[in-house]
Image (cartoon, rainbow, N blue to C red):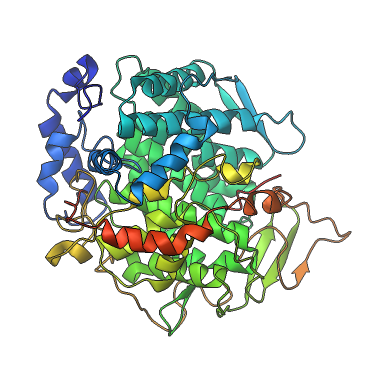
Amino acid sequence: MHETRRRQISRRSLLRATGATAGAVTLGTGIAQAAGRAQPQGAARAAGSAQGSGYAHPGLLHTGADLDRMAAKVKAGAAPYAAGFARLTANRHAQSGWTANPQATVYRGAGSPQNYAILYNDVHAAYQNALRYHVAGDTAHADTAVAILNSWSSKLTSLEGSADRFLAAGLYGYQIANAAELVRDRDDFELDRFRTMLTTVFAPVSESFLKDHNNAVVTNYWTNWDLTAMACVLATGIFCDDEARVARVVEYFENGAGLGSVRNAIPVVGDDGLAEWLEAGRDQGHALLGVGLMGTVCEMAWNQGIDLYGHDDSRFLKGAQYVAKWSLGGDVSYTANTRRKGAIGGWSGSETASDAAPVDPTMTRPIWGMISNHYTKRRGLSAPYLTRIAAKATPEGGGGDYGPNSGGYDQLGFGTLAFTRDKVTGSGAGAGGGTGGGTGGGTGRGKPAGAGSASPSGSASPSGPAANAPGGSAPGPGSATTPAGGNSGDLASTGTGDLAAWTAATGITALAGGLLLLRRRGRTQQEQPRTGGGAHSK
């Protein structure tokens, strides 16, 4: 591979590697026992890949095997990787020499001098340059990513603003951790200082939200708000080798009281094997965001041997299929739900969503490549709506390709390049977290309780919350009640004014049919398996 690749072990990683084997086995066993989960098959192989801990690094959205696959496929000119890489290299954020503009305080939300666009542009520049470095080997891109990340860790001290500060912490926290994960072994990267920034600036804000939801009733905030916070805390836990944070997110995903837990986000499973996505009763843009965020959480967990993708009879698959069918213009059912909203000890009200919102079939986000490839390639399951919508979105771009406003930067993207994979065959195809299902280096963490094997169908009856599952905080279809005087005082103060701006910027669907053929032709050998809120604001 490239002489300049990250595979060259730095002085720092040599020091960190001392005692890695013992540490990995101990930590992996400990967290599995603490969470009451059995270890997956092949867990012991984690020891060699973890650098001084039980977590595999790189091991957030991309593993070492993923990065090697991208580099090899692009070098060979294989489709659709080459088209995915072309989208990366064409993005203005992916150019070496990007100059960061770090701020001591980042503000997001009404009533503050908002400057959060500076942060998300720099974060996406760091990520895109780091990814480009791994694929093509040009150290100028690694140098750029490191310079951006070091500049922010040397200056950023707080996140402020309205309730939107929780979105800033969650979205940009998980994203900046993913950028840093790709250069963490560079000698010039200030690893300890970056850890401090994650654990003192980003993660505490997200943890506070998951704990008390900005002093609102737990159902005041839509699914996306929880998921942004979960993504940040999970990414921080893995990056900083903090098993307590990882375990906290896994527990919340399975059993949390807020709308980001899987049974609250996906409250009803239908006879057709599809499961209603709660936020479909709000609007399409936020539903797409939520699916992308849940996929992000599942992918990061999967790469550490934790199968949230398959939890509760693959409930997320059924919810993602539902949103894909609905977004393609298909008819879907929707069970009316009413949720409580308001501040604890203050105003209160309720809101009912009675039907799935209208959709624009041209609206897209770069979320489908990751989810579709997991279920159809890693797990070998049929997911026709995911397959169709992923093909339509191919090749996926990233931040800056989907409009100029914040919604165009909510996902890191580039799923065609990063997540396209050959189909796993054999006995392991349906077992995530094990040898065949593939963990990103594997770390000895078992599947969540009740994860079982993936299945394309489920119970027809509602499960989790009752059919009146709580919804979200912004006005949606149906009736709503507000305090006397008509002022809701809604704590979830984000708006939807920029939805139209980013939805028009797809520009890629005409290639879908040809790329489907190219994907089949390019599958010449079996890949060795190893091993994604109402966050859209003004």
- Up the image or down, 354 lies above or below 83; here it is below
Q: Residue at x 47, y 54 (%)?
A: 367
> Can see residue 492?
no
State left or right for residue 51 relative to residue 407.
left
- Up the image or down, 384 lies above or below 514; here it is below
Q: Residue at x 81, y 61 (%)?
A: 483
Of the pair 124 and 510, the residue shown nearer to us? 510
Residue 200 in the image: state x and y as whole percent. Answer: 48, 27
Of the pair 157 and 454, the residue shown nearer to us? 454
Question: Most extreme residue toward the right, as rendered?
Answer: 485
Marks counted in the figure total: 0
Of the pair 525 and 214, the residue shown nearer to us? 525
Of the pair 459 and 180, the residue shown nearer to us? 180
- Give the position of the C terminus as an image quadrant: top right
Q: Quadrant of residue 1?
A: top left
Residue 94 in the image: state x and y as whole percent. Answer: 47, 31
> Can see residue 69?
yes
Residue 160 in the image: state x and y as whole percent. Answer: 64, 31
Q: Quadrant of residue 234?
A: top left
State left or right for residue 389 relative to residue 426.
right
State left or right for residue 434 relative to residue 467.
left
Q: Residue at x 63, y 44 (%)?
A: 403
State left or right for residue 131 relative to residue 93.
left
Residue 138 in the image: state x and y as whole percent. Answer: 34, 24
Q: Quadrant of residue 68?
A: top left
